[in-house]
């Protein structure tokens, strides 16, 4: 047997040759740009977007990029957007929907006493949309929004409900919406990820990274986590300052060794998407070392723009920064950005079990101004023409009290809204009952997802991936496009 160099050299792929010839991450970036024809490996991607369809796969696309604002914990509809005067009339009385219905709640609501909203509701805009006093900035934007007034879930448990809203399934292991869009449409830029996730500064949501997983899709489609509040927003993008032993030469030698290991792995496990995803992540990291710091630098924005998002106010600083960075990432070619409000846990999120009057206002205060700023900023910059904003949560809250003044989980009905490209402004779809307990016209995550894909030029029934003998899709065997909210 010859030397290791001879043994390895005769079987070098073009990518590995470039990896070894290059120096550090720079060589990786060069390898990707010159060797893109090998980038797909053994995975089976969907067909490329058609320029004739404005970048869509199956029909003309109205949306090119998306920002999703996720209120983690279950934002209460009757305390935000779904005005229920009946609750004030019945306040303190036992909740009785009639029909000998057996009342149940997740963590216990002894007595099932109706509790009115502690917040004043007023009508706003030409649409006359009712909005709670805790959301004054979004109240000024209602004529730009399309409300889904009776979204329903199959579960009232945080983890499964978050899975359902993000992946269309209540079980783990399925690809997130952002991963499906990455798989179907690909990237808009070589220098930044296609799917970016910014968790709350307080921590990850329920299910942690599983909410933005690629599931059974090729691994490269999973969400890239960015934490703008940290000194190093993107983990491991740069060596730590203490790692003085890492030099361009050591990186070059390390990547040469890694290329050899990758080649051995590819031969042993052909078709393993993790191999290509690993190489792709290094290549992307090389380009992000140059592009990411600039994209995340909000100091480049005017003082007026920073104030618009609330960066000068402590309650709104973190979420406002994330929303502003979301806009900057969308401008630079990121296709899907997800911004989270609220971490996992019993407090510090929208899971208001103890006291709706004291727990909900801080969450609303932290998000209201930045969410409204995103609507105003995108519209002022002309980005409404091809950008979709989604505001949602995993489920709603009960019309009766938990303890003295809290609300328990409710899968029966909650509110989401859409704004931007392809959306009919100032309209609503669906309706909950007089208490905000159940949906009269249910809208499911499948319908929301089908509508989002439709706006991006994708027929949700045709975007599939073969897995375990079945053609899997985001909407499973369900879903109808909600044409009522489309322009």
Image (cartoon, rainbow, N blue to C red):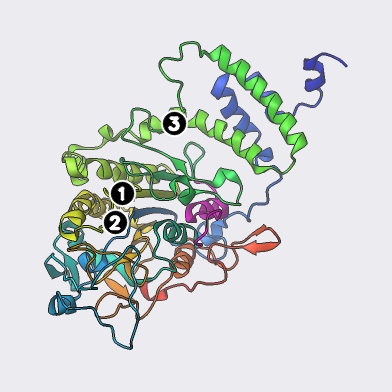
> Dot 2, crowdedness within 10 Å: few (<14), some or many (≥20)?
many
The circle on residue 351 is: 2
| Marks 1 and 3, how far apart at CA | 21 Å
* Magenta stretch: includes residue 64: no
The reply, left or right, for residue 294 in relation to residue 405 is right
Q: Quadrant of residue 228?
A: top left
Residue nearer the viewer, 250 or 194: 250
Query: In the depicted view, which residue is nearer to us: 226 or 19?
Result: 226
Q: Is disc 3 placed on a helix, strand or loop? A: loop
Residue at position x 30%, y 46% from top? 323
Indicate which disc, 1 or 3, sits on the residue closer to the N terminus: 3
Disc 2 + disc 1, Cβ < 8 Å:
yes
SS of the residue under disc 1: loop
Residue situated in front as seen by the camera: 300 or 209: 209
**Badge 1: residue crowd in 10 Å (few <14, some 14–19, many ≥20):** many
Q: Residue 237 at x, y = what percent? A: 46, 28
Residue depicted at 53% across the width and 34% down the height: 284
How many angstroms separate mark 2 from mark 1 (CA)?
Answer: 9 Å
Look at the picture and state if 153 lies above or below 12: below
Nearer mark to the viewer, of 1 and 3: 1
In the image, which residues are magenta?
169-188
Q: Is residue 370 above or below residue 486?
A: above
Q: Any magenta on residue 185?
A: yes
User: Is residue 31 toward the left or the right of residue 371 in the image?
Assistant: right
Real-space Cα separation, disc 2 to disc 3, in angstroms: 29 Å
Q: Which numbered dot is residue 342?
A: 1
Give the residue at the far front of this rendering.
Answer: 110
Quadrant in which the C terminus is drawn: bottom left
**Whole-percent x and y of residue 373?**
23, 51
> Considering only order in the chain, which callout, 3 or 2, is on the residue closer to the N terminus?
3
């Amino acid at each position: 047997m010859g030397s290791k160099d001879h043994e390895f050299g005769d079987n070098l792929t073009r990518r590995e040759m470039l990896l070894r010839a290059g120096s550090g991450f720079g060589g990786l970036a060069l390898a990707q740009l010159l060797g893109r024809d090998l980038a797909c490996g053994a995975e089976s991607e969907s067909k490329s977007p058609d320029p004739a369809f404005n970048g869509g796969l199956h029909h003309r696309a109205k949306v090119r990029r998306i920002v999703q604002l996720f209120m983690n914990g279950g934002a209460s509809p009757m305390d935000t957007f779904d005005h229920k005067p009946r609750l004030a009339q019945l306040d303190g009385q036992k909740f009785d929907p009639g029909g000998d219905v057996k009342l149940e709640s997740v963590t216990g609501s002894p007595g099932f006493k109706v509790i009115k909203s502690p917040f004043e509701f007023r009508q706003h805009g030409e649409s006359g949309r009712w909005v709670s006093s805790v959301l004054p900035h979004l109240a000024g934007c209602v004529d730009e929004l399309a409300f889904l007034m009776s979204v329903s879930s199959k579960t009232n448990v945080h983890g499964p409900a978050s899975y359902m809203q993000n992946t269309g399934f209540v079980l783990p292991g399925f690809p997130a919406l952002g991963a499906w869009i990455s798989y179907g449409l690909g990237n808009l830029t070589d220098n930044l990820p296609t799917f970016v996730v910014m968790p709350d500064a307080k921590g990850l949501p329920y299910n942690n990274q599983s909410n933005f997983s690629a599931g059974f899709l090729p691994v490269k489609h999973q969400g890239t986590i960015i934490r703008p509040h940290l000194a190093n927003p993107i983990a491991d993008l740069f060596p730590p300052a203490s790692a003085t032993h890492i030099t361009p030469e050591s990186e070059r030698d390390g990547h040469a060794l890694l290329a050899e290991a990758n080649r051995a792995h590819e031969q042993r496990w052909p078709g393993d998407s993790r191999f290509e995803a690993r190489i792709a992540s290094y290549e992307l990291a090389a380009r992000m070392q140059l592009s990411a710091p600039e994209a995340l630098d909000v100091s480049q924005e005017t003082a007026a723009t920073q104030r618009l998002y609330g960066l000068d106010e402590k309650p709104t600083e973190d979420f406002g920064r994330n929303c502003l960075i979301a806009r900057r990432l969308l401008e630079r070619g990121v296709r899907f950005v997800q911004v989270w409000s609220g971490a996992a846990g019993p407090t510090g999120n929208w899971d208001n079990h103890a006291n709706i009057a004291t727990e909900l206002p801080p969450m609303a205060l932290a998000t209201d101004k930045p969410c409204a700023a995103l609507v105003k900023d995108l519209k002022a910059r002309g980005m409404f023409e091809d950008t979709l904003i989604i505001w949602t949560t995993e489920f709603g809250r009960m019309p009766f009290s938990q303890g003295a003044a809290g609300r328990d989980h409710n899968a029966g009905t909650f509110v989401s809204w859409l704004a931007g490209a392809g959306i009919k402004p100032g309209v609503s779809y669906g309706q909950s009952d007089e208490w905000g307990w159940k949906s009269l016209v249910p809208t499911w995550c499948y319908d929301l997802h089908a509508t989002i894909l439709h706006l991006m030029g994708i027929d949700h029934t045709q975007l599939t991936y073969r897995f375990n003998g079945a053609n899997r899709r985001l909407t499973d065997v369900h879903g109808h496009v909600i044409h009522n909210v489309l322009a």
